[in-house]
Image (cartoon, rainbow, N blue to C red):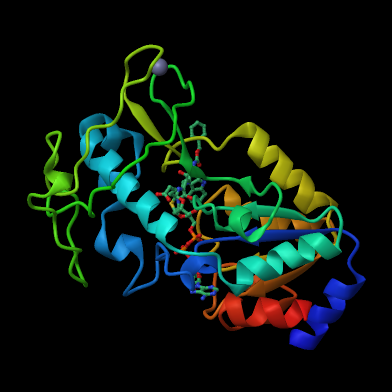
Amino acid sequence: MSERDAADLLRDAKRVAVFTGAGMSAESGIPTFRDALTGLWSRFDAKTLATPEAFARDPALVWGWYEWRRAEVERVRPNAAHDAVAAIEAHVPGTVVITQNVDDLHERAGSRAPIHLHGSLFAPRCSACAQPAPPPIGTAPSAPGPGAAPAPRTPEPAPVTGGPAALDGERDGRRKPPECAHCGAHVRPGVVWFGEELSTEALSAATEAAFGCDLLFTVGTSGLVYPAAEIPYVAARSGAAVVQINPEPTALDAVADVNLRGPAARILPDLVA
Ligand code: BJW
Ligand code: ZN
């Protein structure tokens, strides 16, 4: 099946779900995780930065890394794929956007209430009492230096030496996390790390949307991370058509009725044109 078939499916759909991953934001300039040369996990070690154990071991390293990523997201704009998703929402009432992304680019493109399965860079909370904390303001550190992770294939961004980022005990992109106003414990990034449970509310809402849709787009995700990667299977099992948009083959190829190979910012706008 072709792009034309996918556009026909969209035209006839009554309830659409759009399941997105890091590839959705790639053309805004935000790196994916697993792309071989440019993915975050090719430059940084997930175990050292994206687990609860990492935060317990070195909170300043982990907080600094997420602050750097938050600042990168703040510097970029939604791309044509985010705009196209917002256009689908505008044309097909009841469309649900389910994202694994921790950026806010869907919201900034006009999507109303995307479900953030893996949390958000903009919703920090207390690591002990879970109270939400105010989003940090001000400059962010550069990416962590050699203490953070090996850089097997590409060089890391240069570590900060001196300047404003060296204030408050910072070095190599480290930044001391704020303290919770309620209990004094460290504030942590509001994202879902490996080995952590997803929000029950978010996962239930996503599962319900996948179960109830007649068309699901899976866009820019490798489909390797569970339980999020179940979502297209839930849709397929309930009888929905599944359309995948990705320049590369993925683990979700088999569940997709239509595989459109190409960048999201080119293919999605064509479907809604
Ligand atoms: C383009 C493009 C363009 C490029 N256009 N496309 C079952 C089997 C095996 C393992 C497990 C399992 N169930 C659970 C696990 C363990 C684990 C897991 O899945 N591990 C696997 C990796 C092996 N899962 C967990 O740990 C989860 N928790 C859990 O299971 O808890 C259980 C529990 C129960 C009870 C008590 C306690 C616990 C949590 C997973 C959390 C994932 N977190 C991260 C980091 C978030 C914070 C942060 O941002 O730092 O989420 S990891 C990372 O992967 C991030 C992403 O959301 C997620 C998915 O990545 P995504 O979006 O697919 O990106 P990539 O890079 O993989 O793919 C990008 C794609 O884009 C590629 O295909 C490109 O081709 C494409 N692309 N340019 C379109 N222009
Ligand atoms: Zn607290």
Q: Quadrant of the C terminus?
A: bottom right
- Residue 178 locus on image (x, y percent): 30, 27
Residue at screen point 91% across, 61% down:
14
Q: Quadrant of the N terminus?
A: bottom right
Along the viewing direction, whichever of 260 and 167 lies nearer the viewer? 167
Residue at screen point 66% across, 52% down:
98
Q: Left or right of 227: which side holds 68?
A: left
Q: Does residue 257 sit above or below 77 in this rendering?
A: below
- Residue 5 locus on image (x, y percent): 82, 84
Along the viewing direction, whichever of 77 and 210 lies nearer the viewer? 77
Quadrant in which residue 159 is drawn: bottom left
Q: Left or right of 148: which side holds 21?
A: right
Res 260 seen here: no
Seen as rendered, the residue at the extreme top is 183
Residue at screen point 75% across, 79% down:
271
Q: Left or right of 168: which side holds 129?
A: right
- Residue 51 locus on image (x, y percent): 35, 40
Where ligand 2 lies, by quadrant? Answer: top left
- Residue 75 locus on image (x, y percent): 40, 60
Residue at screen point 37% across, 20% down:
180
Q: Does residue 71 sit above or below 56 in this rendering?
A: below
Quadrant in which residue 72 is drawn: bottom left
